[in-house]
Image (cartoon, helix red, strand yellow):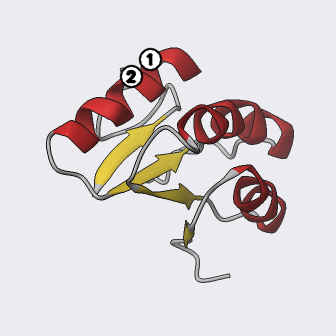
């Protein structure tokens, strides 16, 4: 699984992917390196992280999912705790939901 965080406060990559184009490019690199699932997240789950409003999370993740759908053989996973993000991500091409809150 390749992790693609499109959030400025991620503890795993420190906000290294500031926009959809960078995130898509990184996801394709991860697939080339062997990732068969690409996990896309728009809200940090690190301890103390500020909650991200729904519209902001959608703004972060949907362009990445839409940009990868049909361009990759990897399964696309949405990392979110919000039901609407799950639904919209699935409609955009996500195959799997990664919900740390077990909604």
Image quadrant containing the C terminus:
bottom right
Q: Residue at x 57, y 22 (%)?
A: 20
Image location of residue 38, percent across then percent down: 39, 51
Image location of residue 11, percent across then percent down: 33, 40
Q: Residues within 10 Å of mark 2 (few under 14, many from 20)?
A: some
Tell me: 21 left or right of 12. Answer: right
Q: Quadrant of residue 84?
A: bottom right
Tell me: 35 left or right of 10. Answer: left
Image location of residue 60, percent across then percent down: 66, 32
SS assignment at label 1? helix
The residue tagged 2 is: 25
- Depth order, front residue of 30/60: 30
Q: Is residue 54 visible?
A: yes
The residue tagged 1 is: 22
- Depth order, front residue of 9/57: 57
Q: Residue at x 80, y 55 (%)?
A: 88
């Amino acid at each position: 699984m390749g992790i693609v965080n499109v959030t400025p406060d991620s503890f795993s990559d420190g906000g290294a992917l500031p926009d959809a184009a960078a995130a898509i490019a990184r996801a394709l690199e991860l697939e080339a390196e062997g990732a068969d699932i690409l996990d896309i997240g728009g809200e940090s789950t690190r301890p103390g992280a500020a909650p991200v409003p729904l519209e902001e999370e959608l703004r972060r993740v949907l362009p990445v999912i839409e940009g990868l759908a049909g361009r990759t053989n990897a399964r696309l996973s949405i990392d979110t705790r919000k039901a609407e993000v799950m639904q919209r991500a699935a409609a955009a091409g996500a195959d799997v939901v990664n919900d740390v809150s077990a909604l």
